[in-house]
Amino acid sequence: MINERVLNTLIALLLLVVPLFAWQLDEPFIITLATKAAILALAGVGLNLALGYGGLVSFGHATFFGLGGYTMGILASHAQSFTPIMESPFLIDGTKSMPIIWLVAIVISAFVAFIIGLLSLRTTGVYFIMVTLAFGQMLYYFSISWPAYGGEDGLSIYVRNEFPGLNTLDPIQFFGICYVLLMVVIFFMSKLNSSSFGLALNSARQNSERVQTVGISPFRLQLVAFTISGAVTGLAGALFADLNRFISPTMFSWHTSGEIMVFIILGGAARLYGPVAGAAIFILLEHVLGGLSEFWHIFLGAILLLVVLFAKGGLIGSVSKKAASHG
Amino acid sequence: MGNVILDVRNIHKQFGALKASDGISLDLRQGEIHALIGPNGAGKSTLIAQIAGRLKPDSGCVHFLDQDISLKSTAQRANLGLGRTFQVSALAMENTVLENVVLGALGKRGKVFSFFKSVMHDKNLLSQARATLERVQLIDDSNRITAELSHGQRRQLEVAVALTLAPKAFLMDEPMAGMGAEGSKKLTKLLRQLKQDAPILLVEHDMDAVFALADRISVLVYGKIIATGSVDEIRSNPDVRKAYLGDEEAT
Amino acid sequence: ALAVPAIAVADGKVKVGMITTLSGGGAGLGIDVRDGFMLAIEQSGNKDIEVIIEDDQRKPDIAVQLADKMIQSEKVDVMTGIIWSNLAMAVVPSATAQGKFYLSPNAGPSALAGKGCLPNYFNVAWQNDNLHEAAGAYATDEGYGKSFILAPNYPAGKDALKGYKRFYKGEVAGELYTKLGQTDYAAEIAQIRASGADSVFFFLPGGMGISFLKQYSGSGIDLPVVGPAFSFDQGILQAVGEAALGIKNTSQWNKDIDNPTNTAFVESFQAEYGRLPSLYASQGFDTANLLLSAMAKADVGDADAFRAALKLADFDSTRGDFMFGNNHHPVQDIYVREVIKEGDIYTNKIIATGLTDHADAYAADCSM
Amino acid sequence: MSTILLIEQFLNGIQFGVMLFLMAAGLTLIFGVMGLINLAHGSLYMIGAFAAATVASLTGSFLLAIIASVVAAAVFGAIVEFSILRRLYDRDHLDQVLATFALILIFSEGTRWLFGSFPLYLDVPEALSGTVVLLGDIQYSRYRLAIIFIGLLVAVGLYLLISKTRVGMRIRAGENDREMIGALGIDISKLYTWVFALGAGLAGLAGALVGAIQSVQVGMGEPVLILAFVVIVIGGIGSIKGAFIGSLLVGLTDTLGRVLLPIAFSTFMESSAATSVASSLSSMLIYLLMAGVLLLKPSGLFGRAPS
Amino acid sequence: MSLLELEGITASYGASQALFGVDLTVDEGEVVALMGRNGMGKSTTINVICRLLKNQSGTARFAGQDLSSYPSYRAARLGLGLVPEGRRCFSSLTVWENLMASARKGEWDLNRVGRLFPRLQERLDQYAGSLSGGEQQMLSIGRALMTNPRILILDEATEGLAPVIRQEIWKAISELKKDTGLSILVVDKTIKELALVADKAVILERGRTVWNGQFQSLDATITDQYLGV
Ligand SMILES: Nc1ncnc2c1ncn2[C@@H]1O[C@H](COP(=O)(O)OP(=O)(O)OP(=O)(O)O)[C@@H](O)[C@H]1O
Ligand SMILES: Nc1ncnc2c1ncn2[C@@H]1O[C@H](COP(=O)(O)OP(=O)(O)OP(=O)(O)O)[C@@H](O)[C@H]1O
Ligand SMILES: [Mg+2]
Ligand SMILES: [Mg+2]
């Protein structure tokens, strides 16, 4: 049993040190993998706020991941072709600047999350799972058949977007950007969890009636949590699009939602670093097992099964005691 | 007796063919404990739920502090100062005892949407929370996970959370249920002190407690109030004896 | 080319990165491409070629990452293998932008055939519209005057219907886009019945096609059906079974194309893998032979020379004559096949040539 | 569009709905009644189809194939329940999601390993092939009629089992409080294994029946799984009646949407664009339906509101 | 030999030990009151008897069988009828279904339970989840009786019941005892009412049996010391 904080620090360091080594050894692909892990972890950290802390099992977070991705794709493709996105009533141009793209991705995902939350939060439990899935599927089918940005074929952005002062095409620098963003968001989440909002949200998950009778509206708590959660996942989507320099409707598919969810459960729901551990291990497995055999999914499945059966509370939960969730 | 704090006017509520509230009117005045007794299934919890905002009455209205609160949500009513305890404990089971009480204190303070300050380091909230835990004698258990508490201990915690809100009126649905004899005795004492701060609408089947505490008693049978009066009046009311008390006092 | 870049040591070795679908849905296509490709490499006995194979799971993002890996870590010279247009769109532009050659054994999205054509990109199979165009031409030849046409609602589906209409001169009795992955076609079949059409053209790849054909054959409608080879290929045909018998489909290859390369290929493939080769296997086989032919002429380190060597397409294709158009897509004959039963096995027989020396509709837009 | 075609499409919608119900029936049982989120339900459906295809090609008998599908899926189900899932009943739904997700991977790739990557052959039996004429003018597939009939039988059978028998009561009681029903003397573990096997068997049956007119291939269970979830959520979880009505609603919405939307759009759009737009919209239609139903009735049409 | 015998039972919830040595016997036809303050281990003891919790040491025997290897459903079939704390009715089943789901043959049947609790009789088709608290308590007792147990184990038997009903239940219990020789282990806080039916009492304090004897011999010093009354 390790203290959860120590473990978290270890995970954070590991995620930093591995790509640095790979950089020294000139193994850029390992850096790419680490970047992917960091980005998907970020998506997971977003979902974890809703799913882990808020108890809102969203099976539609691909919506936000995809929105983030398409924000990047649309802005960058217009910048690439020097055509404005919109001319009337006012002119909107594309852009290749990461910070602006992030901002737009966050705002759009947050807005959509707010709307979806407003509607979905009337339901609970499995019904909530399915309504969020429904919204995700609608966007998925829409993106497949909407020809403007490639439909099912997706859209390539040939050159990675720009960040002032950095060469984003250099894998290690792009990793640095993603890593810093991940750490900033995790820091924000840790603050949030121990704040009064965190306590109330956490209590609302366990007993919504209790929260109401002390004069707090669970609906508002959950709506805010869902909105923040969607925004963070949207940011991750924008980064993911930049990692691949490519977007496609798969970002919206329910497999994506499921995968983000799997990271969280694998690592440990409602654990600060759960999604990080989950995403990292999943990607590692995918990479290592993928080389073993054509039928590597069998091994992946077997390993996941073992984790569920024998590691209660995910990987983090099984090696560390639950640190008091507050303070 | 003081001013009317809570005024329930002609409430009706029907489940299918069953009239759970059949034109109930009652009030709660400053400084009193108004006990609501009645057979099982008479509609007491249903009435409490309608006052607290969990259920919508079919007709009738509820006034609280001279304000019609019929259209307000549970949370809004709580903010106005209506505190309640549940017949079946409603607590955040995975949280510690202290966290549950801090939540109550937080509800009172408001400003829940603060994202950066650690709530469990907030001296103000903590001292309030600890004080109430002292009052219900759960202070030694304050760092335990609520799920580990025994049934009776949870009942105590339930009362504690309502206390932190420092409400202007209490709705208590069987607070004594599940408490041991000793616990009931202590709670009886506590409630007697509490009513100075805020009047209590008390639903309870523990007649020792009711007779010891109540300033007024209303008897609800089949959704109708059949009698309201002092302890002695109610005790000697033959209808009440038949419908509810049985031959208890005869023994 | 005097200025040979420093890394391109002229050792004649070529490293090939193959990204293809080997697991999950659609893995059959990837496996066939891989097997065909590797068969040609083996038969050549060429020791200077090294092939790295990775599974993209049919996910674009995985394909992109594998491409990064092959380019950044494995430092491959040539890439190939991708089955699906959407994955190709994700990988090809950036791989060729980084100076790699890409030889497509299957996907031929229109975006890479016209304005977006790329010097280092060669398609050895077809431009996506080709087979549909041939189907349209065949329908016109047969004198069909009222076709009912349907395809899934995604870019390839839209291209398919457009491609068919480009060469089909009759009237369209009805045009339907179905949901991607749809499995029940009762409603569409009822519409076909009611439309008064005299023929049906459909493009429904994979399981969608199997479902459609089975349900169509059970519906009691007996209008003639044409479609591209994808729903009638060797791998899938056994699953469709009798429902496919007699259906005409268009393909640039069939096992009965009569040339020595093809005969040898069909035999050796069967001997090596114990099954009949498919369209995809032939494409994989041709892709490898194209690469080998270029290697014999030029060093991959000399990009211009290597490109020119590829462009020559100086190899014996299983299809017989093979050449590239200006946009590096095939100019080839496209045949009409009929599904027949040989013993217990369903297979195809060429009955006509749909289009001869056919290039694609986008080539003119390509400035190469 | 002629009335007769409209009626035929209506029938098609109902038929599609019943087919969905066959798939959803097992899922309602396992998910709605036992409270287990079983993402691997689609895999059991696939196992049924593969078992049927294998037996059909060996024996040539469709009846044997159907029996094989039920048995194979039920046996797999029972094994999975016994060895893995029963450890997860007390756990969070999320753990069940992860475990059954893992099972999908194992089952899908395991099947591909055994049977290869190409679809298998399974066709409708001679006796049920061809069409019958309904209402004077509608040619209707005999096999589809048979599916409707079997679907109705399953619906009635399940409804009676769950709501009218003691076994049904015990299953539902277990869903409320497993520990308690055990403490009253019921061997709920064994019962659940049986129920799971039954649900799995139904999935297998659906796989075989539907597989005969669709394609038997790895991954065939996934789209079905999502649809089945949509159906039972619209109907209200745990309600057989709800699943049935939900199936019909989804079947009708989907079919009629596919048919009518293009017509509606072509009144004001060029026809090629109209079909394309209409088709996009119709793929979203059932999700719109589900969202709409849940927004109006947050626990589905026949679900009980959480008390 | 006693019907139910516990000897030196210890048990824990995870890492925290709740029982440190509980001894208790219930003879055939006897009513035993299990008493103690809140959190002293009464419910835990009952959980051990019904095999909802495994004891770590000590022995639990019922009807001559060592319970340690029994899962809860088999222990129940030996004749343990549990009325648990918090009622735990099956909320999405109707009253009738609650009663029938686990019924076993014997003298207790729907009619007899209906006579005991006419209120339930009136509400057979209502979902248990919407019953009032007291109605649920009756249902929980009725449900246990329907399994025709040899011993009825009531945890907080009369919690939340109106005095009239409580009197009826105590009356029913004493009748049960008289007519059918049913053994009963009961947890309840009202000593006054227990006195009407209980033969023996066992008092727990911090997970240990600290007092054990005839109910009559409970005196004010003992109740004051252990129960705070
Ligand atoms: N949602 C509901 N649907 C149908 N009937 C209900 C519902 N809620 C409560 N009832 C019925 O209404 C009546 C009043 O219930 P209520 O819980 O208010 O009783 P109570 O007076 O609190 O009883 P107790 O003292 O036993 O707690 C009961 O008969 C109960 O079965
Ligand atoms: N699930 C649990 N996990 C951990 N500890 C528990 C759990 N349930 C009970 N305990 C602890 O075990 C001890 C005994 O509890 P138990 O429920 O047996 O008490 P009790 O005598 O029945 O009390 P009450 O009269 O309040 O119901 C208590 O200290 C309690 O906190
Ligand atoms: Mg009540
Ligand atoms: Mg207890």
Image (cartoon, rainbow, N blue to C red):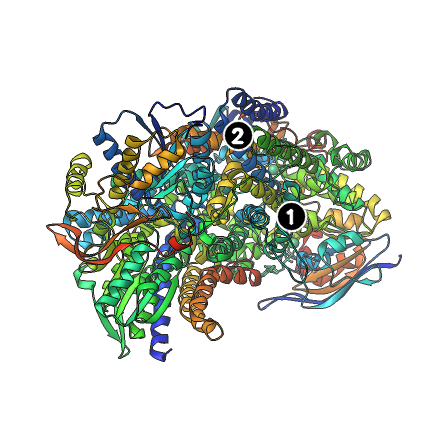
Q: Quadrant of residue D259?
A: bottom left
Marks 2 and 1: CB-CB under 8 Å?
no
Q: Quadrant of ligand 1?
A: bottom right
Q: How would you rate the neighbour count of disc 1 (Cα within 10 Å): few for under 14, some for 14-19, many for 20 or more?
A: some
Q: How would you rate the neighbour count of disc 2 (Cα within 10 Å): few for under 14, some for 14-19, many for 20 or more?
A: many
Direction front: furthest residue = C2
Q: Residue at x 45, y 27 (%)?
A: C5
Q: Is residue B240 visible?
A: yes
Question: Which three-letter amino acid code belongs to the residue tagged 2?
Answer: Ala
- Of the residues under marks 2 and 1, which one precedes in the sequence? 2
Relative horizontal placement of residue D128, taking residue B55 as reference (left or right)? left
Chain letter of the residue carrying label 2: A
Residue A63: x %, y % from top left: 54, 50
Residue A34: give its label: 2
Direction left: furthest residue = C343
Q: Residue at x 44, y 58 (%)?
A: D231
Residue A58: give its label: none
Residue A104: give its label: 1
Q: Is residue C58 above or below residue C69?
A: below
Relative horizontal placement of residue A235, taking residue D233 as reference (left or right)? right
Direction right: furthest residue = B2
Residue C50: x %, y % from top left: 32, 27
Q: Viewer-proximal residue, A121 or D201?
A: A121
Q: Residue at x 75, y 36 (%)?
A: B119
Q: CA distance from mark 2 to mark 1?
A: 25 Å
Residue E76: x %, y % from top left: 44, 39
Q: Is residue C20 above or below residue A293?
A: below
Question: Which three-letter amino acid code belongs to the residue tagged 1?
Answer: Val
If the image is split into quadrants, where does the C terminus of chain D sit?
bottom right
Mark 2: which secondary structure? Answer: helix
Residue E214: x %, y % from top left: 60, 32
